[in-house]
Image: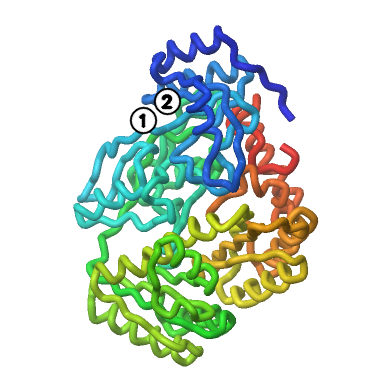
Amino acid sequence: MQMYNKIDANILNELRKIVGEEYVITDDYNLDVYSRDYTEDFSFKPEVVLKPSTVEEISAIMKLANKEKIPVYPRGGGTGLSGGALALLGGMCVSMERFKQIIKMDEDNFQAVVEPGVITQNFHDECEKLGLFYPPDPASRGSCTLGGNLAECAGGPRAVKYGVTKDYVLGIEFVSPEGEIINTGGGVLKNVSGYNLTQLVVGSEGTLGIITKIIFKLIPLPKHKKVMLAAYDSLENCTKSVAEIFKAGVTPSALECMERCAIKAAENMLGKKFPNSDAEAQLLIECDGNMESQVDADIETIAEVVEKMGAVDMILAEDSNKMAELWALRRCIGEAVKSISPYKEEDTVVPRANIPQLVKGVREITKKYGITAISYGHAGDGNVHVNILKGTEDNPAWDENLDKAIREIFALTVSLGGMISGEHGIGYSQKEYLGICIGEAEMEMMKRIKRTMDPNGVLNPGKIFPGS
């Protein structure tokens, strides 16, 4: 572990000169607010919260941090689920909330230039006003920011058809851990001019640089969409249907799996009943496209597949209000499940044809250890969120067996050709498990990259690597 220094009065004065006194926050209330993200019940107070507004200010902050050996923790919307923004060792929390400009919308080239503090939903809305489409849509899209999406390479339901955040990033401006202002990529669709530094930083969880500007690729907004909710009396049949839909020649724009306990949690949170909520499991399936006839044909094909696979009922939503109601069910599940009790969320991902084996194995493992788990997620791309709940009563199995159960779930995931995180990242909460899916040589290569770019180890230390 790197040795770091504390922030003293002289350093605070230097920070005030850089960002202005108003944007150097040291009161206990705000330090407590910035001590958390959405990861379980973790809390780590920074010594100071900084709110810069220019790339030059961030550059000056990083140069000062390097000189004084003080850790820096970049923060977006604070909605992360692996502790990526937590200030584990105190130091400086650099909030990107003032970087909130949509700089340019280029309708001719289907591109946008934005700052990282833009709320994802706001960016969606601005794109759609112009007939453009930015597909990545994490569950927290109403509060998460684009910079955080890049840091974690966020996905969301539409990744099954359209890909994840990295697939839409053409270039970035970022500040290196030593304070250099670096520009990578650009507004072109082809680029093999040197190493792809853009994709090195995207998904690096704020450990290799602080992103200050993003160039996005956009696509035309699909003109038509429809949503189906298919209910099953068997979780196994539900999950087996996923691969069959693709084998039938259809790629939905979203394909989500929800088991009964997850749906019940959403009902309790929203205070309303959803169709077939007593069914063992349901698939939420969305199809979109520019030709309504093709969307109708895809929905018809899917209906035939799910009926063949044992669906007991199907509901079709064709107008925007009904589709929004069904999506409200899915989008609130994460928050609803987490509100039940203390929890650990695992972000497993496997080839989608192996989802039935994963879900069955998770049930067997948690039953073996006397632990309750609720699973749901992006079945279309094999990404299953496994939420392990402590419950409201004292549960000795939680303390005694939780780590064993998680390790078995991850070992099963890897044995099925999967990885331990699909979109939430490793961060703080999962770092001790990384060796289950990453070999020693690969781990050392990653550490060498980190040491090369951040020789003093000041940017987001204590994340990703076991023992760090």
Label 2 crowding class (10 Å Cα cut-off): few <14, some 14-19, many 20+? many
Query: Disc 1 marks which residue?
Result: 98
Number of dots carrying numbers: 2
Closest to the observer, 34 or 307: 34
| Position of residue 320 measured from the top left corner of the image (x, y, whole percent) | 25, 68
Residue 333, relative to residue 51: is it above or below? below
Are the two marked residues, 1 and 2, in contact with CB atoms closer than 8 angstroms?
yes
Closest to the observer, 96 or 363: 363
Name the residue rendered at 71%, 26% in the picture: 2
Label 1 crowding class (10 Å Cα cut-off): few <14, some 14-19, many 20+? some
* Label number found at residue 51: 2
Name the residue rendered at 39%, 46% in the picture: 143
Task: Give the Cα separation between the discs numbered 1 and 2.
Answer: 7 Å
Look at the image and tell me whether residue 194 can be seen. Answer: no
Name the residue rendered at 67%, 69% in the picture: 362
* Label number found at residue 243: none
Q: Is residue 372 left or right of residue 93?
A: right
* The N terminus sits in image quarter: top right
Look at the image and tell me whether residue 91 can be seen. Answer: yes
Closest to the observer, 454 or 234: 234
* The C terminus sits in image quarter: top right
Q: What is the secondary structure assignment of the residue under circle 1?
A: loop
| Position of residue 173 measured from the top left corner of the image (x, y, whole percent) | 41, 34
Name the residue rendered at 59%, 58% in the picture: 347
Q: Residue furthest right?
A: 400
- Please tell me which of labels 1 and 2 falls first in the chain: 2
Closest to the observer, 123 or 216: 123
| Position of residue 25 measured from the top left corner of the image (x, y, whole percent) | 47, 21
